[in-house]
Every structure is written in C-alpha cells, then in structure tokens.
Amino acid sequence: MPEPETRESWRLTGTYRSPVVTIDVRQIVGRASLMAASHIGRVALLLIEILRGLVEWRIWVPRAFEQAQNVGYGSLFVVMLTAAFAGAVTSLQAGYQFTGSIPIYYAAGVIVESIILELGPVLTALLLAGRIGARYAAELGSMRVTEQIDALESLGRNAVSFLIIPRVVAGTVMLPVLVVVADIVGITAGYLASKSSLGMTHADFVHGANFFFRPLDAWYSMIKSVAFGLAVTVVPCYLGLSTKQGAEGVGRSTTSAVVSASVLILFLDAVLTQLLLQ
Amino acid sequence: MIELKNVYKRFGEHVVLDGVDFVVQPGETVALLGPSGVGKSVLLKHINGLIHPDAGEVFVEGMDVRLLKRRELSRLRSQVGYVFQYGALFDSENVFENIRLGITDDEAAKDRAFCERRVVECLGLVNLPPDTAEKYPAELSGGMRKRVGIARAIAGQPMYLLYDEPTSGLDPVNASIIDSLVEKLRDELGVTSVVVTHDVRSAFQIANRIALLHEGKIRAEGNPEQLLAVEDEAVQRFLGRDLDITLAQLKRYRTHGSSL
C-alpha cells in the first residue's frame, strides 16, 4: 500500500500533489438560499408572535418604559454628538462645493435636506444598531444559553410578551424621537458652522432651508425612522433568541446582530427612498 | 399522571430519544438515571412542552402536551414546577422578584403583601433565611442558587415538580441538603416528582422508582431493589460505577433510614 502523501513526504521527495478541491457553486448558493429562507421565515413567525402578544399589554407596557428610558436617555449623548459633527461637516463640504456662481443659500438647503432625509435617520439608526442591537442580542443570547428563557416559559409566562415586545416597542418608538433630536442638533451645528466658516447670514440660512424644504421630507424621515427602529430591534432580538453554544454563541449572535441590522438599515434606506421619493 | 408514549426525538442526525415509554403515577418520586448526554433533560423538557417530540405522545393530566394552545400550555406549566440544572435564575432580578415570578396566579402575584409572605414561606421550605430575598443571584453560592430555583418552582404550588440534575456540581454536603429537600417537599407538599440525575446514590435515596435511560430507550425500570436485581450488563455497569452498595446495604438503609 503506497504511503499517503504529506507535506513532510513532499519535503523529502519533492513530489507533493495538492488535494483536488472542488467548489460546487450550485450547492453553496442552494444552502445559502435555504438558510436565508429559514431565517426570513423564523423572523416572520417572531413578528406574528409579537403581534399576538400585544394584547398582553399589562405585561409589556411597564417593561417597555424601562427599555425606552435605556434606549432614549442612554443613547442621547452619542446621538447628539454624532449629529453635531455630521451637521458641521456637511456644512463645510457644502461650502467647499458651492463656490462661484451658485448662491450661498443653496448650501443651507443641502445641509438641512441632507440632515433630515439621510444623515439624521441613517446615522442614528446605525448608532443604535451598534448600541442597543448588540445589547439586545447579548442579553437575550445569555438568557437563552443559561436557560432563563426556558425558565420563563416553564413558569407559564410568554417570553415574547416579557422580553421581546418591550424591547421592540421601546426601540421603534424612541428611534424617531432620537432622529428628531439628531435633526435639530445637526441643523444647528450646520447653521453655526456655515455662519462661522462660510460667512452665511441668518437670513440666507433660513431662506435656503425654507426654499428646499417640503413637509413630505419630515414624513419621509419619520417613516424611515420607524422602519429602522423595527430593524434595530427585531433582528437582534431574533438572533439573541436563536443563540446556541454558550459564550461563543453569544459572541456570534452579538456580532451578527450588529452586522445584520446595519445592512438591513442600508437596504431599507435604498428601498424606502425608491418608494417614497420617486 | 405523566405518560410518554413511544416518544422519538432527534437533533440533526443524532437520535436522542428512540421510542421512549415512561409513566409517572400521582404521588410518586421517579428518578430518571443515565449517563451525561443520554437525553434525560430532553425527556424532562418534553413533559412541560419546552421541547416537542418528533413522534409519539406526551400526556400530563390526560392532556396531550403537543396539541395544547399557548394559553392551555401556560395553564399546564403553572401546574408543573421545573427546577433547572444551574438554577436559571433571572440574573437582573433579585431573589424576591425571581420567586414572585413563580407565583403563577396572576391576581395573587399583584398582591404585594401576599407575595412577600409567600416568598418568605418558600425560602423557609428550602431552608434559606428571609433576608436572601434581597440578594441577587450573583451574590449566592451554587447550592443557594439551586435552592432558590426550587423555591421559585414551588411558589405557584404546582402538582408536579421536575428536577433537572438538582445535585450536579455540588459538594457532598450541599448535594445531601438538596436530596433531603426533595424528600421533604414530597412529604410536605405531596407533589409528584421526576428527578433527572446521573448520581446513582442520590436516586436511590430519594426515589420510589428509578428508570434508566440508555441509548434512547428506558433500559430498566423499577424500585431500587428491583433495579439492583436487573441482570442487564449495561445497567449493572452503570449502577456499579457510582454505587458501591449491595442489596443488603440498601435494605439496611431502608430499615434504619441511615445514609447510604
């Protein structure tokens, strides 16, 4: 019987043949599609459970207040800080681009519209995907692997009403509130930056902002915020509940939650823009 | 009565339960023995519907657990206390809130004074002082956590108690305390109990009847004397590994009530 080829034998004889690795693309695509369909199906089932659990409002309302305080108050500083920088940088970039024959008040329109339509909702949602998405996935994942969720169920309690609905409601309600705060802070920072760096007057800024602003913009921002609120809560909750294999599984769920929620935010951003602004 | 009929369960390719028949009569304490990883906890979780079988039937109080709607299942679970292997206490809540969640009567659970009385009562039943109620799970030892887990399970006055490895990971003194507690609760509350364990000594001490789960099936079943008399090599090997006793010693224990 011939000796099996190893890297050691190759060193000795110089006749090592690499093993043939075949990649079946159809198999990979098939498996990925099945996995994606399975996740989508289970998220849909979780959403149905959430809708059914809403009738148990005595259970979830007090817990939703606790969570809302955590999401809202806890995220306020970082949201304001990010919005302030985003507003100031947008102002400086607008000033850099709008030189020459373009009236300066156009820059005010760009700053306000950029903040309301895109930067306010998307940056706030991405921040919350990192902050509360990771937290929800880690909390629920730890509870899953230490059997706390099984314990809750074994006591005849509905884990969805106790754990999931308060988190989803808190995130979905508080994200639009935080977006409004981010819009105000971002526009204020943009105004201050444009005054100090671009030499724009108060009248120019107000004129430019009013010239481009339409009420639909505010609605669009709020609709996006609610959709993003669902994305940054439902996906991490689902991944937290699906956690397996101890501490490593909790780490995996947490990472997946942040990545999946962030990607979903960008995807929803593209879809909603196409649907609402075209 | 608890009755599992021809229950099959597999996870992926791994068959865990391969046609298990298992009955627990009212008032009995049955120990479910078997080596680690054989599927004892999986079987236990079938009883309160935390896991559903791939095939077969699970009846508790005459109700088929697989077919119960959520509300019916919640009602059934309020009658079946479950003691988890590592306590599974809610670590963000203190002991009081943990035990309060075990009070499954919603009206009673809203009454703060009743809850305070009941929590102290349950802590007393598991030999813990009342001031334990203010502590958080992280401040408790392993043995205390298990006892709080038991207190939570009995807070709703269940008819059945399911114990998942109540003595695993404990030193002999704490294990003995938990064993005595299982006996005390059986005698004082009259609950029907199923105790999953791989501790043969503990099983022989607390159970009226013992079932040995092996390769997905109940390999042997009976009272301690009957189980010792089983000639099946796998059964003898498992019992002999942990239990260096003879039938005569067992009889002496039964007669004098001394520790094994």
Image: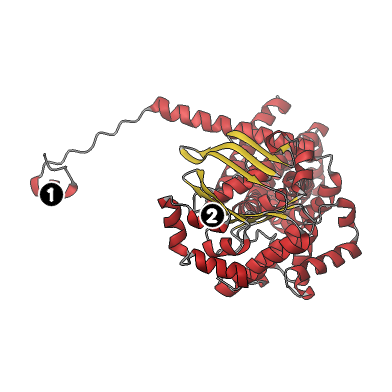
**Colour scheme in use:** secondary structure
Report the amino acid beneath label 2.
Answer: Gln
- Relative to A8, A136 lies left or right: right
**B65 and B1: which is toward the camera:** B1
Which residue is located at x 56 percent, y 66 percent? Answer: B251
**Badge 1 element:** helix
Quarter of image, res B92: bottom right
**Badge 2 element:** helix
Q: Quadrant of the C terminus of chain A?
A: top right
What is the x, y in percent for residue B138? 66, 69
- Relative to B177, A6 lies left or right: left
Q: 10 Å neighbourhood of mark 1: few (<14), some, or many (≥20)?
A: few
Q: Label 1 belongs to which residue?
A: A11
Q: State whether residue A149 is above or below residue B12.
A: below
Looking at the rendered image, the disc whose residue lies closer to the viewer, 1 or 2, is 2
Quarter of image, res B33: bottom right
Can residue A21 be seen from the camera position used here?
A: yes
Which residue is located at x 74 percent, y 36 percent? Answer: B68
Report the amino acid beneath label 1.
Answer: Arg
Can residue B35 be seen from the camera position used here?
A: no
**A133 and A39: which is toward the camera:** A39
Q: State whether residue B214 is above or below residue A24.
A: below
Using the image, tell me which numbered label, if any, was put on residue B226: 2
Chain containing the residue with disc 2: B
What is the x, y in percent for residue A43? 65, 36
Q: 10 Å neighbourhood of mark 2: few (<14), some, or many (≥20)?
A: few
Chain containing the residue with disc 1: A
